[in-house]
Image (cartoon, rainbow, N blue to C red):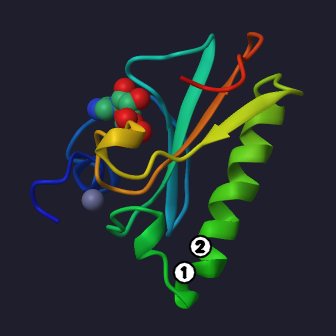
Amino acid sequence: MSDCIFCKIAAGEIPTDKLYEDDEIMAFWDLDPQAPKHFLVIPKSHLRDSSAVSKGDEALIGSIVRTGARLAKENGLDDYRFVVNNGASAGQTVFHFHLHVLGGRVMDWPPG
Ligand code: AMP
Ligand code: ZN
């Protein structure tokens, strides 16, 4: 999608502090971290949110989760939080599916 910031990041048109990339997914540090360690894992192809995930995307979503867990461990996080915001009132501001991985501090529950 031409006006999607994460599609532009996936295409290399906007630079990021990249952690990982393969043919299908990418991980990079969040620009406005909400924890000492906060990165995002995205599919390179545009997918609006969790409700847009189809049966054919199951391996892709599994890869995002596995990569988030691996990168968390590689970056010294034993405990961490995965967050996916879906819809504006849930806090989604970028409408391209992304897994937040946050850690390095004690997390509150319930989240705000
Ligand atoms: P959400 O509010 O769940 O849609 O999360 C969007 C996240 O993307 C926020 O945490 C932003 O700080 C982050 N973000 C937006 N633009 C960039 C960028 N260019 N590089 C890294 N992170 C970004
Ligand atoms: Zn996109």
Label 2: which secondary element: helix
Residue drawn at 36 percent across, 69 percent down: 45
Q: How many marks?
A: 2
Q: Is residue 24 above or below residue 64?
A: below
Tell me the quadrant of ligand 2: bottom left
Instruction: Give percent across and percent down for residue 55.
Output: 57, 89
Residue drawn at (40%, 74%) of the image: 52
Judge whether 34 appears above or below 89 on screen: above
The quarter in which the N terminus is drawn is bottom left
User: What's under tag 1, amino acid-wise?
Assistant: Asp
Per the image, the residue denoted by label 2 is 60
Q: Residue at x 61, y 68 (%)?
A: 61
Residue 103, horizontal then vertical, whole percent: 71, 21
Residue toward you, 112 or 80? 112
Q: Is residue 20 left or right of residue 67?
A: left
Residue 92 in sight here? no
Answer few, some or many: residues within 10 Å of disc 2's Cα (few below 14, many 20 plus, some between 14 and 19): some
The quadrant in which residue 88 appears is top left
Looking at the rendered structure, which numbered label has been put on residue 40?
Answer: none
Is the residue under label 2 in contact with that under label 1 (CB below 8 Å)? yes
- Image height check: is 69 above or below 46? above
Residue at the spot 50% in from the left edge and 69% down from the top edge: 23
Q: CA distance from mark 1 to mark 2?
A: 5 Å
Callout 1: helix, strand or loop?
Answer: helix
Q: Is residue 88 left or right of residue 109?
A: left
Residue at the disc numbered 1: 57
Label 1 environment density (alpha carbons within 10 Å; few <14, some 14–19, many ≥20): few
